[in-house]
Image: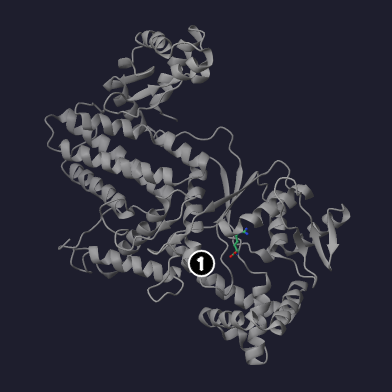
Amino acid sequence: MNLLLENKINTELCKIFNKLKLDDRFAFVKVSDRPDLSDFQCNGALALAKITHKNPREIGTMIAEELQKCTFCESISVDGPGFINLKLKDDVIAQNADAMADDERLGCGMVEDPHKVVLDYGGPNVAKTMHVGHLRSGVIGESVSRIERFVGNDVISDVHLGDWGTPMGMIISEIIMQDGSLDKVYDYDIAQITEFYKQANIRCKDDENARENARQITAKLQEGNTQYRRAWEHLRNESLKAIKANYEQLDVNFDLWWGESDAHQVCGEVVRIARENDISEVDNGATIIRLEESNKPKPPVIIVKSDGAFGYQLTDIATIKMRVEDLHAQEIVYFTDSRQTLHFEQVFEAVQKLGIAPNVKLQHIVFGTVNGADGKPFKTRDGGVMDLETLIAMSKEKVSQSLPKPNEVEGYGTAEIEKLTQQIAIAAIKFQDLKNTIASGYVFELDDFAKFEGKTGPYIQYAVARINSVLRKAAASGLQTGNIVLQAPEERSLALKLAQVHNVVMRAHTDKEPSIIAEYTYNLAQTFSTFYNACPMMNANNQELVSSRLKLAKLTRDILKLMLYLLGIEAPEVMLKAENK
Ligand code: ARG
């Protein structure tokens, strides 16, 4: 159920606009910019005045006079050039909060036209260590996946493992070069495999023969050469184990663990469609699809290279075909940094020419990079690439400085402290990322990101745990929650803030922008903190107030937990703090 306070006012406004013969597209309110003056404001009179060339204040006054007759407003005024400011009656806000608390979706509605969305937010590569560059796509994608499911869409997330391009030939060729054969390959673990790949890169950089060799092996692997296939399977499996462990730590999940290689069969079909329909042409031995020059000149898509190997773009085109035909995707969304912008423009245009995804919305969401204090991509202290494991270890180290040592607190041995450290460390990393809009990059705040105060994940987790503790104590004293009554201004502000949740989630869904939820979550935690300091809960003046405040606290806790969930962050029942902190 969508329990938005605005709905009530908007319905009334619509009636009034119709009665006054005003265009009801402008009959809506938004949360007030001046909460000290009003709860909501309608700027419709200004918009109407522009169109009709009438005086906005006069239109505003006309609407306000009608609004006076409705039962749910405490006060209505027309201010400035014609803003209509509304303050709701306390019991209207209180009843709405009660209804939210009784609703299993806490007042959040769902989309009217649920559809199937495939989310592509993985893209790690075989034989390459996952690093900070993979962080944002996983963290943002996981959150968007949870938001989309929550609003009712049917989501399939796919990791789209990079397991099929020239790097595969490079590493196989490097192993053969060093070992003389592929016999030992099956003993190699991920560390050794990554090392071979690094050496392959160095070798291929200035050795054309090595590059040519790698290209030929890639082509043979793709054609199905059994010896290469077997070796490749081992390399892929070992990499996948390491990749899964990384994602598990980050609590980033996928429904499908398909790779580029899974699209191989369909790649052949796409090439056939392109050739049969004269969409492709042969250019210097390669098969290419030329793109329209009109909107923005783009290089052609090389679907088959001159040596017969399938390229990265073809795998993405074929994967779209599979997602549409096998998964029935109606929308496909990709999350990568800006280096792939051209790639996806080319892929989407080629898909359109090939006609393989009619009526499917294809979207590429580009995120900014995670930078160090110097504004360049975030590195380790010695200037190396920051791999994900190092980053997580660093965050855990920071968090453990704020937590007691094992067995310092009863019931918290090594395992419990380790689990808590992990939950907080991941929250610190994820929230620092998700509080920024997707498009902007951010500087990794080495000092503050894991603190228990400020705009951090641990701060929100702490707010939840603090409410948990109050509710536990209240339950132990036999205190119950009861209907919400609003007396203090801090109670009123909190109830109004809670009532925004539906809109916040819907905006995050429409814009595919988890930062909207992160921002709200932080503001809600702060609003609660103000309420907590001003309004005693268990020692309130009378029983009615105690029960009401407990219910407001519980609703806040549930909404904070839901928001954290949508961000992909866990909410531990209890947060501990080291004695000296
Ligand atoms: N594996 C690719 C890379 O590391 C990223 C894949 C992004 N997703 C996709 N469907 N192309 O560059």
Can you give x and y, in whole percent of width and height, for residue 276 in the image? 88, 55
Residue drawn where x is 18% and y is 30% of the image = 545
> Observer-nearest residue: 515 or 327?
515
Q: Amino acid at mark 1?
A: Lys
Residue drawn where x is 49% and y is 55% of the image = 368
Q: What is the secondary structure assignment of the residue under circle 1?
A: helix
Name the quarter where the N terminus is drawn.
top left
Residue drawn where x is 64% and y is 84% of the image = 174
Lateral position of residue 311 relative to residue 369, left or right: right
Can you give x and y, in whole percent of width and height, for residue 222 in the image? 74, 72
Can you give x and y, in whole percent of width and height, for residue 207 in the image? 67, 84
Can you give x and y, in whole percent of width and height, for residue 129 in the image? 51, 72
Q: Is residue 54 above or below residue 415?
A: above
Residue drawn where x is 48% and y is 15% of the image = 49
Provide the residue designation for mark 1.
244
Lateral position of residue 68 relative to residue 174, left or right: left
